[in-house]
Amino acid sequence: MTKKIKIGTTEIGGGSPVKIQSMTNVPTSDTERVIAQINALAEAGCDIVRFSVPDEQSAKAVEAIKSRSTVPLVADIHFDYRLALMCIERGIDKVRINPGNIGGENNAAAVAKAARAAGVPIRIGVNGGSLEKGLLEKCGDLPRAMVESAKRHVEILNKFDFDDIVLSLKASSVKTTVEAYRLASETFPYPLHLGVTEAGTTEQGIVKSAVGIGSLLLDGIGDTIRVSLTDDPLREAWAAKLILRSLDMGGDYVEVVSCPTCARTKIDLIPIAEKINEAVSGIDKKLKVAVMGCVVNGPGEAADADVGIAGGDGCAVLFKHGKIIKKIGEAEIIPCLLSEIKKMTDNK
Ligand code: SF4
């Protein structure tokens, strides 16, 4: 089990539930927009939100952002240790910085000292695309080189008596990412923040992230996750939530299973499944709902669903736990199923 680390009001690692992270994409110095985006992300299911701090103006905004955020915040800093110190002074909950490339050990010592005094953990973020020179040749392959790079950064923090560390080892290749994290989980006691970096635009990014993050979570590896998409960060939160839910790690929700349709389907099933899915998306009660194309296979195949419909010819049957309850007209399918779902979730 990984070390438990406190990030503001939440905890990661040590068996805590896996947390969802995303990142804002508006200028951090534009506090109103950042705050609006952070709180929208929190509303969408993010447990922790990160933002870049590329300059002093952004670091100075931390206090105002923090005072109005509903979730713990992470400052992402590259190279400039003074920005890390400014963020820590202003109440940031976690800093992402790599101590090996902030201008020498004195700077790393200063950050470690300030972070320790403030109880702020540090994430070391290794990226497969920007490793130290010569490391790849020395280690032989990218996953090993990434872990070696993480080790060097960790050793610097440990040297200054700092141990509240979170690690990430992201690459744009799913295979490399998974191998690097597997190796890291055998090497370090620290919580791991999972992600496939530069995963791409929406569809490709979600598939790559789901395969990479999902494989690791199934191995019991990973304490926080981020789905990186070239898209609205709200989509990242949505995709991360779906990944966790698909692994039964995302809390209670109404799961809609639906068949792929085939030549036996005689009703317009696709929009029905979409509408039911949409209608139940905000209900945090545990229920399984089936939307199936035919009576021949539907009720039987979805026998483990609490409630469902199976299409006939211009009609459908309503079934519960595989048992047919009644026949309904095609136009009644959505209202009837939604009213059953409402009854069943109201009682939970
Ligand atoms: S449930 Fe029926 S309609 Fe749907 S895929 Fe299976 S056989 Fe085809």
Image (spheres, grey):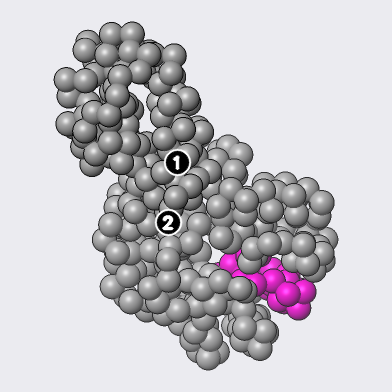
Asked whether residue 177 appears in the rendered view, the answer is no
Note whether 230 is above or below 64 in the view shown.
above
Is 55 part of what is drawn in magenta? no
Residue to which mark 2 is pinned: 251
**Closer to the camera in the image, 41 or 63:** 41
Q: Secondary structure at mark 2?
A: loop
Q: Position of residue 43 (x, y in %)?
A: 62, 51
Q: Position of residue 253 (x, y in %)?
A: 43, 48
Viewer-nearest of discs 1 and 2: 1
**Closer to the camera in the image, 260 or 155:** 260
- Pointer 1 residue Cβ closer than 8 Å to ligand 1: no
Residue drawn at x 58%, y 48% is 44
Q: Position of residue 87 (x, y in %)?
A: 73, 71
Of the numbered discs 1 and 2, the one sitting upstream in the chain is 2
**Image position of 209 (left or right of 220):** right
Residue 343 badge: 1
Tell me the kind of residue under disc 2. Gly
**Image position of 34 (left or right of 14):** right
Boundaries of the magenta span: 74-98
Residue drawn at x 27%, y 14% is 312
Tell me the kind of residue under disc 1. Lys
Q: Quadrant of residue 109?
A: bottom right
Which quadrant: the N terminus?
bottom left
Q: Secondary structure at mark 1?
A: helix
Residue drawn at x 49%, y 84% is 163
